[in-house]
Amino acid sequence: MITLIARRIATAFMTILAVVVLSGLLVHVVPGDPVTAMMAQSVTASPEVMAEMRSQLGLDLPVWQQVARYAGGVLTGDLGTTIRGNEPVARLLLERLPNTFILAASGLGVALVLGVPLGFIAAINRGRLADTAVMIIAVLGVSIPGFWLGLAMIQIFSLKLGWFPVAGTNARNLVLPALTLGLIYCALVARMTRSALIEILAEDYIRTARARGLREREVLLVHALKPALISIVTVVGLVFAYLMGGQVIIENVFSWNGIGRLAIQAMLQRDYPMIQGFIVVFATSVVVVSMSLDILYGILDPRMRQR
């Protein structure tokens, strides 16, 4: 188990380092001059100011030196400073990161509370009306755009019923965006739970357990649930990793002050240091979640410890 953890940590570090290097190359991938793009709407965009900005960003250095400088800064916790306001990128992201984490965890919690029971119901009623109903709900959940569902939530529960505020970042404001994310991703959780349980319920040891006279509840909860957890954990980890950086639209719909909303503002302002910082933080969260999943696999399935 210790060997598995050490290998996964080493792989995660190398992956994050590769992301940092690619992020450092971002300004060279964007067509045109990044300084001209960033200063396009500034009334003080004189040649002298633009030259100073280019020097501040290190764009007057060779590419390899720029990448090495950026990677060295990231490894020491320095993600640069914003173009608008000249504030530390790392500080701004760390201030918003807890809000994004809270929203992601809340949305995932709603998805699990709704999705896992629906998947169980569909699996044990395979081919029946309950199974069809759950699959219809799953298809609708995957098909409905997140921004449309968010706006519908605001229209119903905020404007008409007045139960929750329209926008903000506090406990009451958390309900609607978390419910929106949960409804979107509970469909994925339900489908994965259903598929995993159907596959496991067809195994010989399940038939043996039933032949021994065990109650169906015991067969499902004791003999079928643990093997199904591996598949469920996979989708849970992927959903959570996506939510940490992919809830940009929902954060903007509900004016939730997370890193996703900060990233949209940076894109509109062409603030490349902030965009680079967002990419690094998002990628790091995905890598950390993936590493944690691999370690959890080793706990749930001893066979994974040998890989």
Image: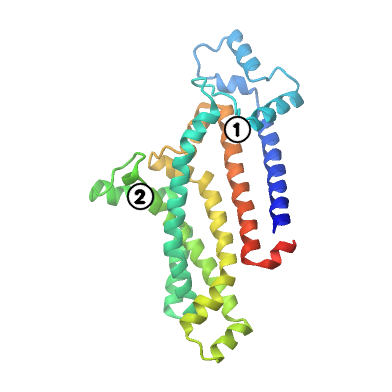
Q: Secondary structure at mark 1?
A: helix
Q: Residue at x 56, y 60 (%)?
A: 235
Q: Residue at x 69, y 28 (%)?
A: 72
Question: Can you tell which mark lies on residue 95?
Answer: none
Q: Residue furthest front?
A: 2
Residue 214 appears at what percent x and percent y?
A: 51, 87
Q: Residues within 10 Å of mark 2 (few under 14, many from 20)?
A: many
Q: Residue at x 59, y 65 (%)?
A: 231
- Callout 1, which amino acid? Gln
One can see residue 29 in this view? no
Distance, label 1 to label 2, CA atoms, is 30 Å
Residue 236 appears at what percent x and percent y?
A: 53, 58
Question: Can you tell which mark lies on residue 176?
Answer: 2
Q: Which residue is mark 1?
A: 276
Camera-side residue of 171 and 146: 171
Residue 6 appears at what percent x and percent y?
A: 71, 51
